[in-house]
């Protein structure tokens, strides 16, 4: 049975912008975030506390959080290590996403540590965060395929997810980093995770590199998933995953879900206004179906 409601976790301000080469002014980012909230988004990745040398676009993380600290939305920030978590806590963040790749080669490229080293660093941090009531999300990269290692064994992804669940995280965002999963693989992994990890929120994070994200979301819905990471305008991609392109577009997912009778709480007209705010500041042309049609009117 499909759900009657789904939660959209907007990742545009973070995943959507992190790979943009020219710096998007902080006030534009904040206007984008504000309009996304006006469209009905209630959970959002705002920015990341990563090295400004590695990801210059995210250097204004503290300023973004400051403007967005005093409301009731789930304002999520990413942090890869203790330094990132400390910077996030200094600005008063109450929801932190850590991120690790199932694939060692990818984790090395992305965080300069092996998967094991990252886990050993993160586990005590997660315990500390939970002791102070911070919402902890864990983003699991290369859950299906890795740009360096190819296919990832399903049991390796499940094992890492279990380890995170045991360490106390509230949510797992399971990611198809380079948009290579097939719907059968989406259904298989999410069905198993749903059965084996009933205690955590399970979220699917699909990149649309091969235009299979909507099909993968449908398969995940059938496996019982009702939380999806999406990016307004389909922006996005990890700078350290060669070939990674945009996340699945929020407008396309909202359109599909609403047409299926699954409520998202997001107003498409207001979402289009959010894309209008960010479009002039990015290098990519926004070519998602829903946005193009809205603009052609
Ligand atoms: P490193 O160079 O190994 O770091 O980078 P280090 O520990 O050796 O420290 C070097 C310097 O960086 C030191 O400063 C540290 O203080 C500083 P110095 O003494 O030279 O002045 N430093 C930091 N500064 C700010 N914030 C920090 C931080 N940590 C150390 N958090 C590091 C290691 C993890 C920092 C680096 O590799 C990094 O920033 N990686 C982030 C990569 C990234 O942002 N990737 C994209 C997000 S993940 C993603 O997109 C996937 C996802 O969407 C899901 C999916 O689709 O798969 C989530
Ligand atoms: Mg991503």
Image: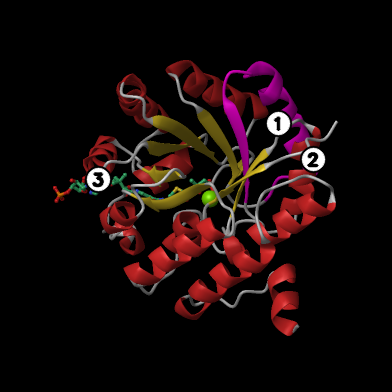
* Residue under the image location 69 percent in, 24 percent down: 194
Locate the N terminus by quadrant: top right
Q: Tell me if residue 152 is in the magenta stretch.
A: no
Query: Which one is earlier in the sequence, the residue at label 2 or at label 1?
Result: 1
Front residue of 273 and 189: 273
Q: On the image, which quarter does residue 134 sit in?
A: top left
Give the spatial CA distance, label 2 vs label 1: 9 Å
Find residue 179 and report its horizontal and vertical position in percent.
65, 52
Residue underneath mark 3: 91
Up the image or down, 74 lies above or below 202; here it is below
Indicate which disc, 1 or 3, sits on the residue closer to the N terminus: 3
* Image mark for residue 190: 1
Residue depicted at x 26% and y 35%: 82
Which quadrant of the figure has residue 91? Answer: top left
Q: Secondary structure at mark 2?
A: helix
Looking at the image, which is closer to me, 133 or 23?
133
User: Disc 1 vs disc 3: Cβ atoms closer than 8 Å?
Assistant: no
Please state the total of marks drawn on the protein image.
Answer: 3
Q: Is residue 237 visible?
A: no
Q: Position of residue 123 (x, y in %)?
A: 36, 22
Cα distance in 3D space between marks 3 and 2:
38 Å
Q: Are marks 2 and 1 in contact (CB under 8 Å)?
A: yes
Q: Residues within 10 Å of mark 2 (few under 14, many from 20)?
A: many
Bin the neighbour count of mark 3 within 10 Å (Cα to Cα): few under 14, some 14-19, many 20 and up: some
Check contact, mark 3 vs mark 2: CB within 8 A: no
Q: Which residue is mark 2?
A: 219
Left or right: residue 156 compared with residue 181? left
Give the mark toward the camera: 1 or 3.
Answer: 3
Q: Circle 3 — which element?
A: loop
Query: Which portion, as a residue range, is magenta?
Result: 180-206
User: Where in the figure is residue 32, as x and y percent of width and height?
Assistant: 47, 66
Can residue 128 be seen here? The reply is yes
């Amino acid at each position: 049975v499909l759900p009657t409601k789904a939660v959209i976790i907007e990742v545009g301000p973070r995943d959507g912008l992190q790979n943009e080469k020219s710096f998007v002014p902080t006030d534009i980012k904040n206007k984008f975030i504000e309009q996304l909230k006006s469209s009905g988004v209630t959970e959002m990745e705002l920015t990341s506390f990563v090295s400004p040398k590695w990801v210059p676009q995210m250097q204004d993380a503290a300023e973004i959080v400051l403007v967005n600290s005093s409301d009731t939305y789930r304002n999520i920030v990413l942090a890869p290590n203790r330094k990132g978590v400390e910077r996030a806590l200094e600005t008063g963040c109450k929801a932190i996403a850590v991120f690790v790749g199932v694939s060692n080669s990818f984790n090395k490229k992305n965080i300069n540590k092996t998967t094991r080293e990252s886990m050993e660093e993160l586990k005590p941090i997660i315990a500390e965060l939970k002791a102070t009531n911070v919402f902890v999300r864990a983003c699991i990269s290369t859950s299906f395929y890795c740009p360096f290692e190819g296919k990832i064994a399903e049991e390796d992804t499940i094992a890492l997810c279990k380890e995170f669940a045991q360490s106390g995280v509230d949510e797992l965002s399971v990611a198809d980093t380079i948009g290579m999963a097939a719907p059968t693989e989406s259904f298989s992994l999410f069905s198993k995770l749903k059965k084996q990890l009933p205690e955590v929120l399970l979220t699917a994070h699909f990149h649309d590199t091969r235009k299979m994200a909507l099909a993968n979301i449908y398969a995940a819905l059938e496996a019982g998933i009702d939380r999806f990471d999406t990016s307004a305008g389909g922006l996005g991609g990890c700078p350290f995953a060669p070939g990674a392109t945009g996340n699945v577009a929020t407008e396309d997912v909202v359109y599909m879900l609403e047409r299926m009778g699954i409520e998202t709480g997001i107003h498409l007209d207001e979402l289009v206004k959010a894309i209008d705010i960010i479009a002039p500041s990015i290098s990519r042309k926004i070519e998602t179906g829903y946005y193009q049609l809205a603009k052609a009117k």
